[in-house]
Amino acid sequence: LPISQAFCAAASVALRSFPPSLPDLLDTMARVAFSGLASGAHAAATFPNSHLLAPVVAPSAGTSGTPAAWAAPKKACALAEIREAVHDEDWARNYSEGMTKIHMRAEWSASVDRCSALQWLVSSTQAKRVLEIGSFCGVGTLALAEALPANGEVVALELDPFVVNFGQRFQVKSPSSKKIKN
């Protein structure tokens, strides 16, 4: 049924007997639902002229109203960002150019499993202060800080200033960064 007919059908049921009987009401609801008026997981299918189906940039000076391009999604988790950055960094080049004191490897960074274990340990012991010796880029440090209570503190010790600065660029993106002392 077109939308106007479905609406009229629902109105006629309501007018025939008020309040409508349950079978009449269910029948009308089913007709409306299967007529394409329903919404749900695919809201754009309910309203086929929706802007959601084909976003278009409004014509302005120099444009012709072409379809808009979507921006790539951004990571919301500072922990995932730092982990990816450590993996993507060229540690051999950093060492050969003298940026780091020793040849470092991305594998030294705390894995997802290690971060989970550290967070469990902090939570289960109800720790408020943590000392991390040899923090590398601070992936484990950030995981610990995220598991600590609001008044918690992680003191992270690392000898190489390059990796400390590298990690701090990502740690400041987390609300838990105020708990980290380097």
Image (cartoon, rainbow, N blue to C red):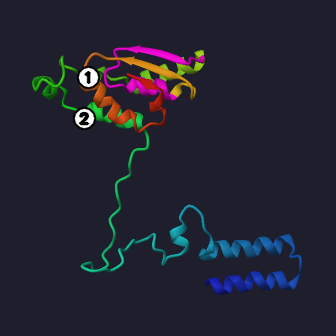
The image position of residue 167, as x and y in percent, is 33, 29
Q: Amino acid at mark 2?
A: Asp
Q: Which of the image's four quarters has the C terminus?
A: top left
Q: Where 121 sits versus 112, above or below?
A: above
Q: Which of the image's four quarters has the N terminus?
A: bottom right
Element class at badge 2: helix
Asked if residue 63 shows in the view, the reply is yes
Range of residues picked out in magenta = 126-146
Element class at badge 1: helix
Asked if residue 106 shows in the view, the reply is no
Mark 1 in CB contact with mark 2 (< 8 angstroms): no
Question: Could you say which disc has been placed on residue 174 in the image?
Answer: none
The image position of residue 69, as x and y in percent, is 32, 65
The image position of residue 156, as x and y in percent, is 39, 18
Q: Amino acid at mark 1?
A: Pro
Residue under numbered circle 2: 88
Residue 52 lies left or right of residue 110; in this view the side is: right
Q: Residue furthest left?
A: 96
Q: Kindly indicate the quadrant of the structure image that contains residue 77.
A: top left
Residue under numbered circle 1: 161
Judging depth in this view, the residue of 68 and 1 nearest the camera is: 68
Q: Where 161 sits versus 169, above or below?
A: above
